[in-house]
Amino acid sequence: MAQRETWTSRIGFIFAAVGSAVGLGNIWSFPFQTAANGGAAFLVVYLLAVFLIGFPTMMVEFVIGRRGEQNPVAAFGKLGYGNWSFAGGLGVLSTLVTLSFYSVVGGWVLSYIVGSATGAYFGDAGAYFGSVASGPTAIAAHGIFMLVTIGIVASGVTDGIERATKFMIPAILVLLVALGAWATTLDGASAGYSYYLSPDFSVIANNFGSIVPPAMGQAFFTLSLGFSVMIAYSSYLGRDDSLPADGGAIVVVNTMVALLAGFVVFPLLFATGGAEGAGGGAGTAFIAIAGAFGQLPAGGAIGFVFFAVLLFAALSSSISLLEVPVSYVTENYGYSRSTTAVAMGLGIALIGVPATFGTSWLGFYNDVVFKLLLPISVFLLAVFVGWVADTEAVDELGRGSTIGESFTTAWLWWVRVVVPLAVVVTLYLGIDALYT
Ligand code: PFF
Ligand code: NA
C-alpha cells in the first residue's frame, strides 16, 4: 500500500480540523437555534455544552485517531479492539447521511450568492427561497456544490484539504470581523446585542428540558463530533503534537466564529424587524437574512460577502464529511483516492436528492443524524475510550503534551461517567422536546 499522507505541519492539521468544525452549523444554525430557544439563555447552555462535554469528547476522537493511524474503522483493529470497529463505522454512516443534505443546503448558499449579485431576492425573500430551495434549481446547485467538494478531496489530504482550508479559514475570520463591524452601524444593533447577550436565567430554569437537547446536539455537531471526522483527521497527525492544545485551539476558534456570526445576524435581524420570526427552522433563517439584506443600503454587496463566507464554511466542512468514507474505502479496498472520491461523492449526492423535495425531508435527514446516530456514536466512543481502551487512551493523551497526570486522570473519569451520562440525559430529554 502507498505511504499514508500526513499533514505537512501541525498548523495544517489545525486549519483542516477548524475547517471541519466551522460550517453551516456556526453561521447558519447557531444564531437561529439561539433565536428559537430564548436568545442568550440558549447561548449560556450551549457554551457550557461545548466546553464541558464537547472538548473532552474531541480528545476521545483524537486519541483513537492518532493511536490508530488508520481510517476510523480500521483504527479500532490497530488498537487491538477490532470488534469495536462498528463504533467507527457508525460515524462513517453519519457522514454519508449528513453530507447528503449538507450539500443540498450548500447548494442553497450558492443560489444566494447568485441572488445577492442579481438582486433576485430583494423583492420577495420568501418567494426566492421557494424557487431555489426545491426543484431543479436545488438539484443543480446541490450537484455543483458536491462536485467542488469532490474536486478538493480527490486532490488529497495535503494538496486538497490542507491547502483549501488554509485559504478558507483566514478568509472566513477576516470577512466575518468586517461584517460584524458593519453590523454595529445598523439601527437595530443594540436591540440585537441585548437579545443575544443578556441571558434571562429564569428562561433556562423554566425551559431546561427543551434547551438542553438542542444545545447539546448543536455542540457536538458544530465540533464535528460523533462522525469519526476527528478520528480520521487526527490519524494524519504527528506523534509529538499536544492533543489538548490543538483541540483547545480548535474549540476556541470554532466558538469565536459562531459568536461572531451572532454579532452579524442579530443586529441584522433587529434592524429590519426582530428575531421572533427567525427561529422556525431551515428555511426561515435564509428568508430572514436575505429579507434583511434586501431592505438595507448596499445590502446586495454585503449579502454577497455574507453568503460567500457561508460557502467557504460549508465547503471546508463538506470536504471533511467526504474524506471519512473516502479514506475508509481507499485504505480498505485499495481503490485510488480520486476514483473513490468521485464515486462516493456522486452516490452521496443521490442520497441527498429527496432533501431537495422540500424542507420537511431535509428536517427528517437532520433528525436521523441529530437524534439518533450522533448521540449513539458519541456514547459508544466515550464508553470505548473510558472503559475499554483506557490505558492506551491515557497514554496517548499525555504524549507530546505537558499536561500532567492529574489532568489525564480527571479527563478519563469525565469520559467514563459525565460524557455518557450527558448523552443519555440529552436523549431522554430529547424524546419529548423535539428538535426543530
Ligand atoms: N461542524 C460542521 C458545522 O458546524 O457546520 C458540520 C459537520 C461537519 C458536522 C463535519 C459533522 C462533520 F463530521
Ligand atoms: Na461548527
Image (cartoon, helix red, strand yellow):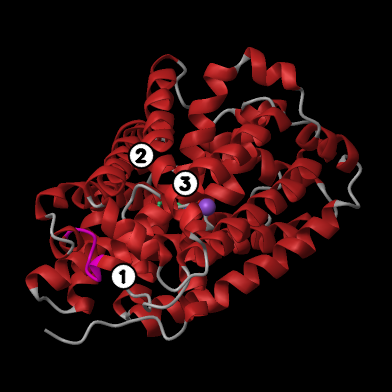
The N terminus sits in image quarter: bottom left
Vertical position of residue 20 compared to residue 121: above or below: below
User: Which residue matches tag 3?
Assistant: 410
Residue type, label 1:
Ser
Q: Secondary structure at mark 2?
A: helix
Ligand 2 near label 3 (Cβ, under 8 Å)? no
Amino acid bearing label 2: Arg
Q: Which mark is residue 235?
A: 1
Q: Nearer the viewer, residue 288 or 263?
A: 263
Q: Using a 10 Å C-alpha cutoff, classify the residue at mark 2 as few (fewer than 14 neighbours), some (14 to 19) or many (20 or more).
A: many
Disc 3 residue type (three-letter) = Ala
Q: Which residue was labeled with disc 2?
A: 416
Which contiguous range is marked in magenta? 68-73
- Tell me how far mark 2 sits from mark 3, CA to CA: 10 Å
Q: CA distance from mark 3 to mark 1?
A: 24 Å
Q: Is residue 397 above or below residue 414?
A: below
Magenta portion: prevailing SS class = loop
Q: Are marks 2 and 3 in contact (CB under 8 Å)?
A: no
Dot 1 falls on a residue whose secondary structure is loop
Residue 198: x %, y % from top left: 81, 32
Q: Earlier in the sequence, mark 3 or mark 1?
A: 1
Tell me residue 26's x, y (percent): 58, 50
Question: Which SS class for mark 3?
Answer: helix
Q: Is residue 40 left or right of residue 241?
A: right
Quick check: is 177 in the magenta stretch?
no
Front-most of residues 303 and 25: 25
